[in-house]
Amino acid sequence: MLPTVRQILAMPVLATADPEVLAGEDQLDRPVRWLHPAEVADIGHLLRGDEIVLMTGVILGDDAEGIRDYVRSLAHAGAAGLVVELGRRWASLPDALVSACQREDLVLIALHREVRFAAIVEEVGARILEAEVENLRASEYIHETFTRLDVEAARPEDILAAVARIASVPVVLESSRGQVIGYDTAGRSASALLADWGRRSRAIVLSGRTGYDRRTGWLMTVVGSRGDDWGRLVLLTDRLPNRRDYVLIERAAAALALHQMRARARDGAERNTHTALLAELRAGRISDELAVRCEAAHLPVRSRSFVAVALRRRLTAQDERHWSLTDLGAVLVKTSRSLRIPMLVGLDTDHVIALASLPADLSPDAMTASLAQEVRRAASVTIARGEVVDRLEDTFRTLLDARHILDAAEADDPRPWITLADVHLRGLVHLLRDDERLRLFVRRELGPLQEYDAQRGTSLMSLLKVFLEEPGGKAAAAKRLLLSRPVLYERLAKIESILGVDLEDPHIRTSLHVAVLARSLADDAHRAPGGAVDSVA
């Protein structure tokens, strides 16, 4: 592991020079890739990032703007810090240099005793080279481990277990909608790890394919092939990630993507047939030929009613195994066959979708009850059911209904299954979430508060959401937020001032509640991919 700025300062060659940290204290745990003794005013373009620059300051003039430009060039180049030996140029570092480094959050260290820069580079360089060799060995081990897992066609839970074992920290695999697909706690509490996961995940936007969020300690990478990304792998680190962590998470993501492709390939011709059928039914492209193809796939279409069900795995701390979508789809296929219910079953990123064909003597409620009972013997799931339709031409409605209801449902809904009537206002807002008029309404109601949070780094929007959703009023909201009542009242008053409203007005609370709900559902929708259904039956 590369040494950090803090570790380098503790090395004898620098410790004897009486170093003093004057800026960038919060960056002392940043890794250092190399050191450059350089009395060059325009060194910034020569740096590659994560280096420490050693200087005496003789090349810097007394012009404060020139000093600020020099510091900006180092910060923009990604330098890890600036070390200045006192005595030759300055007896103490000028205020312009200290303030510029503080503004750029760049580590600034003053050496109060003379030291040979060559000795620093020799001693620290040896430590860095040793760390590089260690990183190469670790990377080789990581590649050997995941190559073996690839050859053995390892399951996702085996891949996640390998990541947690190597990194010694928890790892979570989530869908593109922020739903947890699998995880390994590395011996920690699953309840604490997964608590409020959806909200935490939505708050972090990954700009590239791999990135690190310093605030949360999440190292993340996209899972899937370019153009077919279906998830995100998250390593919850206790420290700044190093090169090995990046190699590990990216290699694991590649192994998960390979497993997904293999799982699709294993389903063969029947999967391809069902995929095409479900896609055409959902698109409403009904023809005589499609009806014949459905019959050939053992989905009767004459004198039948149709209903769609959508299932999403409900994660609990008591889960003894990690369920993949393929596993859940296989359970549904097995159940439908044991109950003699003709059904097409498919996968859609983070849930299972199915279309059942029912005879006249089988009620939809009886079918759903039997199905839910059998499936729940094997796995903890949330089940959504679309409206029953009597024509093949209308199956697109029940397929879309089931998916929308599942997305709108609360993750911990205790009911055996959920219909459109059960999701109430949440279901209606979900169906309208892409309507531009609803977006304008949300912007009008919440825009000033969102801008206030973004500019000042506050979380008043989250506080408002808890206040509006908590049925126990302000006292219960304060308890849930772990705030004293006076602090809660103060923050609610600030929200009223920003939005220009009175939160005691029930009409205002209703309006804001709808806007908050619409914003939350829209955030979920924006994270959702638009892919085809993959069948497993």
Image (cartoon, rainbow, N blue to C red):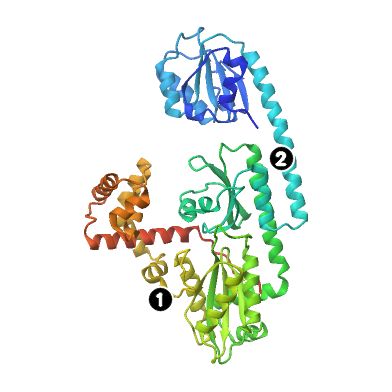
The x, y position of residue 429, in whole percent, is 38, 67
Residue 300 coordinates in the image, percent (x, y)? 61, 87
Residue at left 48%, top 14%? 60
Q: In the image, residue 209 lies at what x, y percent?
A: 58, 48
Q: Which residue is mark 1?
A: 421
User: Residue at 53% across / 42% down in the picture?
Assistant: 217
Q: Which of 32/279 is in front?
A: 32
**Three-letter code, disc 1:** Ala
Where is residue 281? Give x, y as percent.
Answer: 56, 78
**Disc 1 packing (10 Å; few <14; some 14–19; many ≥20):** few
- Earlier sequence position, callout 1 versus callout 2: 2
As drawn, 436 above or below 97 = below
- Dividing the picture into quarters, in which one does residue 257 lie? bottom right
Specify whether 274 is left or right of 192: right
**54 relative to 138 in the view: left or right:** left
Q: Is residue 454 left or right of residue 497?
A: right
Mark 1 to mark 2 CA distance (whole Å): 53 Å
Disc 1 vs disc 2: Cβ atoms closer than 8 Å?
Answer: no
- Mark 2 residue type: Ser
User: Of residues 197 and 94, which is closer to you in this image?
Assistant: 197
Q: Nearer the viewer, residue 264 or 322?
A: 322
- Find numbered disc 2 in the image and state the secondary structure of the residue it sits on: helix
> Quick check: 113 left or right of 268?
left
Where does the C terminus fall, quadrant-wise? bottom right
Q: Name the residue that disc number 2 marks.
A: 139
**Residue 154 visible, this orientation:** yes
Q: In the rendered image, is residue 462 in sight?
A: no
**Kind of element beneath mark 1:** helix
Vertically, is 25 above or below 263?
Answer: above
